[in-house]
Amino acid sequence: MSRPEKHLGLAEQFFGDDARTQRLAPGEALMRAGEPNTRLYLVLRGELRCEGEDEQGVWRELFVLRSGDLAGVTSFFGRPHTSVYDMVAMSEVSVAYLDRVEIPPERKESVDASLVPLVVHALHRRDVQRSELERMLGVAQFGAGIAHELNNTLAVALQGWSWLDRVVSQRLLQGRSAEVVDAFTAGRAEHPHPSSAQVRRRARELAGRYGWGESFARRWARAGLPAPEAGQNTADMLEFFEIGEALADATSAIGHTRHVLDQMHALGQRRQQHTSTFDIATSVDAGLGLVRHLLSGVDVEVISEPEILVHCDRLQLDQVWANLARNAANALRAPGLTEPPRLRIECDIATGMARVRMTDNGPGIDPEILPEIFSPQVTDAPGRTSMGLGLGLSLARSVVTAYGGMIGASNVSPHGAQLEVRLPLAQPTGDRPAPNPTNGAPS
């Protein structure tokens, strides 16, 4: 149980009764705006998303309560005892509580006075969090402006590079033998990179079999080219493989740069929502299609219950799955993995919500940053989050929470990570609230 050390005594005094605890499943509400509440809660574990009206009267997420935070402060001390926020569990949540109804009338004034230091500390933490969120929004909007300008320049560079790549490749391959063309094509394609130990072992085998020098044998082993046949021009084969690989790497780097700029732009922008009702599995398939090239060599399995309908902006949700799958694909390229890479995606209904679980058998997420993995400034090197900036997961969280959903991450045994998304099921048309463009998720 994580609590501020200097307030530990007060927390134990008022929230130490194990009989006054409550557990919430993901998606379950602790309280709803406008409903009576006479309890002051201490969050013991997990996260609560708190939504309410901001200064402009827009209903949106205002802050997140974590271990050590207090919930229900306004309604516990206010008159009437009515909640002003929706507080919904984003993960498995445990809380302890103090109920005002159970406090004898003659003790209420002294209890209120005793709680003041704990409440002041909790409200200070909340103000710091809101200030940080506002600062991050300002940074994101500034970055979006820069990204827009750089994207225009990058578009020109990408167009020129694409032309140059095509022309140079055609000229280089004119009159070349079939094995040289095949080697060049292999260099251009997605291919696994052997470990250092595998390169050393194969280089020794090649040097002994063909009498090659150590450097040439190591380059061939690193390329992963098959053993050459008699009479083949091995020098040209290796050189053209490396040329193809260099061209592919440059193209990929430009694409990655554009993707980062797109994410920076999206993080600071909001757009009109175009919502519709659709089967969540079709959106998952579309999202996977956006990153199919990154999943080459990965055993991808999608299992879905029939007709799991949600009501969202389809393009936004497609991008969520693309970002999560890209994150998994990066993890599955981590060095030292011995099992064939696998990605399992399960779509079902749990606790009255649509649920999508994406599980990989990669190295997992660093436990130290796991609680903050969806923050824009957090990355889990090497390669755990998209482009090393953490923007992909942050954008996914923005979209999911904008539609009343939640997203979480955990490590699985014996190794690997699981990202879980829950979204409200589609309501009948007559009961569905109109989308709020002001509170739209980033594209």
Image (cartoon, rainbow, N blue to C red):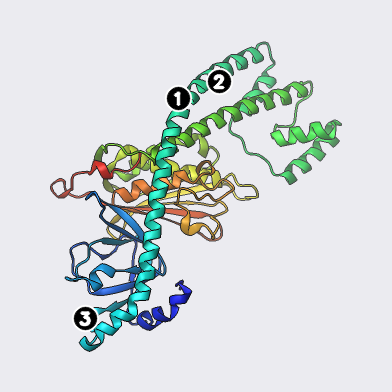
113 sits left or right of 329 in the view:
left
In this figure, which residue is indicated by the disc labeled 1? 152
In the rendering, at what x and y percent does residue 160 appear? Answer: 53, 18
In the rendering, at what x and y percent does residue 232 appear? Answer: 76, 21
Q: Is mark 3 on a helix, strand or loop?
A: helix
In the depicted view, which residue is nearer to us: 260 or 228?
Answer: 260
Q: What element carries label 1?
A: helix
Q: What element carries label 2?
A: helix
Residue shown at 40%/44% (left/top)? 138
From mark 1 to mark 3, how far is it between C-alphas? 62 Å
Q: Are marks 1 and 2 in contact (CB under 8 Å)?
A: no
Characterize the local packing of mark 3: few (<14), some (14-19) or many (20 or more) Cα atoms within 10 angstroms. few
Label drawn at residue 101: 3
The answer to whether one can see residue 371 in this image is: yes
In this figure, which residue is indicated by the disc labeled 2? 161
Choose top left, top right, bottom left or bottom right for residue 42: bottom left
In the rendering, at what x and y percent does residue 358 appear? Answer: 44, 50
Q: Say which quadrant the N terminus sits in.
A: bottom left
From mark 2 to mark 3, how far is it between C-alphas? 71 Å
Q: Tell me the kind of residue under disc 2.
A: Trp
Q: Tell me the kind of residue under disc 3.
A: Val
The answer to whether one can see residue 321 in this image is: no
Residue shown at 45%/51% (left/top)? 375
In the rendering, at what x and y percent does residue 418 appear? Answer: 47, 54
